[in-house]
Image (cartoon, helix red, strand yellow):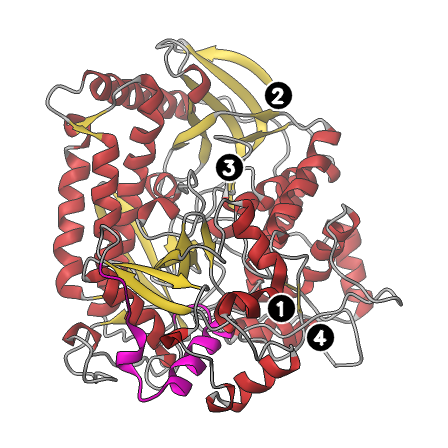
Amino acid sequence: MNWTRFQGARMCVCNTAVVGSGAAGFGAADRLWSLGQRDIALVTEQVQMGTSRNTGSDKQTYYKLTLAGGEADSVREMAQTLFDGQCTDGDTALCEAALSAQGFLRLAELGVPFPRNRWGEYVGYKTDHDPRRRATSAGPYTSRLMTESLERAVREKGVPILDHLQAVRVLSDGARCLGLLCLDNARAGEEDERFVLVRCKNVVFATGGPAGMYADSVYPLGHCGAAGLAFEAGVRGQNLTEWQYGMASLAPRWNVSGSYMQALPRFISTRADGADEREFLPAYFANDGEMLTRVFLKGYQWPFDVRKVAGGSSIIDILVYLERCAGRRVFLDYRENPGGQDVDFAALSEEARSYLAAAGACFGRPIDRLRRLNQPAVDFYRDKGVDLAAQPLEIAVCAQHNNGGLAVDAWWRTNLEGFFAAGEAAGTHGVYRPGGTALNAGQVGALRAAQYIAARRQGPPEHDEAFARAASGALEMARGLAGAALRGEGGEDVREMWRAAAARMSRVGAMVRDAAAIAPAAEALRREMDAFAQTVRAESPAHLRRVFRLRQALLSQHVYLRAMLDYAQSGGKSRGSALYTDAAGEKPYAYLPDAFTFALEDGGRGHLVQEAAWHGGACRFTWRPVRPIPEEDDFFENVWRAYRENGNIDA
C-alpha cells in the first residue's frame, strides 16, 4: 500500500480494499493476509461501529455442519436445507455448507468460546428451519466476540486499517471496479483534505445490510449500510424483497426473542405522552391461555412470518404494529402478569406448559420467570440502564436482516469485475433461512473472495485512463455536493430529511406492503434524488457524513421499493416476512383492517430469483431460475489432480 495524490486529493493505492469492519470484513482481511495477499487495506467509517460488533439476541446463533453426537449429517444435506429456503442458489448453498466447519473452527481457534463437551464435541441445538442440531452459540454477544477475535488477528498481522473513511462512491467504468472515493470524517472540516481516493484492483464490500433505510430498525445506531453505492456503480441486486422483521426494543436496539417472550410478559400501550396505559392483547383472544401460548411461541418463532398469522404467533407482531400505527407507544411489561393475576399455566398449550415446567418457571411474575430462564437476558438491559423489574421496555416491529442483497456467484464475485460482496451485503439467502446462517455466510463469503483474489487477482491496479475519468467525475460530484450542502440556502436539514425518508420506508416498504402505496413513494424518492444537491443542508462539516449516507440510502430505498413493486405486479403473493395487501385474498381475522387481506405464496416462485439493476435513475428487473446444487465428480484422484493444477479455483 502506498500513498500519493490525484487532483489535490490524497490517494491510497493497493491491490485490495476491504470495506467494513464487522465479522465479514475482518474475516476477509484475515484470510487475504493468511493466503499471502499482503497489499491490502481495511477501510472503515468507524472501527467500533457495525452490526456484528453491536448486535445480538438472547442467545445469538451460529449455524454450521453438525460436529457432535451420533445424528447423521452431511455437507450435501446442509446445502439442501439452505437451498430449500426458496430463491436460493445451489452453488452458494453448497459453499456455505462445505466451508461452515472451516469457518467455525477458525473462530474457535481465535478464542470465540463456543461450548464443547468434555470429549471435545461442539454441541448444538435446533434453530428455526433446521432439521438437525446444527446451531450453536457463544451467548448473546456471539457476533461481537467473533468480530473482536478477528480484529485481534488482523491487527496482529499488521494489516493497515484506514479508520474514519466513509465510502461515498464506488469507482467503475461500467465493467470493472477501479476503486473508491471516501469522505475522511476526521478531516471533514478541511476542504482540501476531506476526500480520499482508494485506487485498487479489488474491493471486498462487507458493509452489512441497508439498515439506514428504515425508521423502525433493530440495526445498531450508526450502522447504515451502503448498498446504494454498489447499485450506482452497476452492481446487480437479488432477492431484495426478502427481509426479516420482528419485535425489538428501541432503546437499546435489541431483539426481544427467545426467553423475552417465553417469560410471558404483559403487552401495554400508551399515548405518545405516556398517558392512558392499557393492556391491549386480551381484546383479541378468546381466553388468556390462547393469548399467552401465542406470546410464548414468539420466542421460538421470532421473525414475523405470514404463514403464522392465521392461528399462529405472528398475529402478535400485527397487533403491536397496529397499536403503533394508531400513534401509540408499545411496551413489554415484566413487572406484572398479564391481566394483573396469576398465570394459569394449565391453560397453556402442551408445548409451552412443558417447556416452562421443565425450566422450573411456572411461578411468579414475568421478571421472576425471565430470571429463572435466562438471567443474562435481564443483566443485558440492566447494563444498558433499563431495569426490567422496575420499568417497561418500549418495542416496535423492526427491520432486522436483509436476506437478499448484492448478487454474487460461488466465489462471491458480483457482475462488476473485481468487486466482491461478503456478509449481509451479499444476497445469498432466500425467503427462509435457518437462524444463524448469516454469521456462517459472512465467514464463508470472506474466505471464498479471499481465495479467488489470492489465486487470480494479484498485482497492482492497472494504470489506465478509466480510473482518471471515474475518479475525476466522483471528486467533482462529491466536492459539489459538499459545498452545496454546507451553503444550504433554503435547504432542508439533512437530519429532518433522513427522518422523513426512513419513516416513509417503514410505512410502505416493511412488514406490510401495498403496491398502491409503494408506487407513489418510489416516484417521490426519484424526485428527491434528482433534487438532492439543491435541497439538502448540513449545519456543519461534521454533518457531511449524514449527507452522503442519506444520498446512498435514498438510492437504496428507490431500488428496494421498485423491487417490491415489480414483485407484486409480477403476481407475487405474501411470503416470508412480508405481507402484500391483496383484495383477492383473505383476511385471517375480521377485526383486522383491510390492508391485512392477503394471499399466501404457494411456493411456485421458489425456484426463481429476482435480479435488480439501477442505471441513471431507472430500475430494471429480470427473473432467472435458481442455480442448482452442483453435482460434481468427487472421485478423489480427479479432484486431487485438478487441485494440484489450479487449486480448483475458477479462471
Residue depicted at x 48% and y 70% = 261
Q: Which amino acid, by three-letter code, is at mark 2?
A: Met
Local SS, label 3: loop
**Image height of 614 relative to 172, above or below:** below
Position of 167 compared to 134: left or right? left
Q: Which residues are magenta?
A: 276-304
Tell me the crowding category of disc 4: few under 14, some 14 to 19, or many 20 or more residues within 10 angstroms, Cα based.
few
Residue 372 badge = 1
Residue depicted at x 17% and y 65% = 515
Say whether residue 431 is visible: yes
Using the numbered discs, state the Cα–Cα distance from disc 3 to disc 1 in whole angstroms: 33 Å
Tell me the crowding category of disc 2: few under 14, some 14 to 19, or many 20 or more residues within 10 angstroms, Cα based.
some
Q: Which residue is mark 2?
A: 1
Q: Which amino acid, by three-letter code, is at mark 3?
A: Met
Q: Which residue is mark 3?
A: 49
Tell me how many marks there are.
Answer: 4
Using the numbered discs, state the Cα–Cα distance from disc 4 to disc 2 in whole angstroms: 42 Å
Q: Which amino acid, by three-letter code, is at mark 1?
A: Arg
**Image height of 492 relative to 337, above or below:** above
Residue 273 badge = none
Residue 74 badge = 4
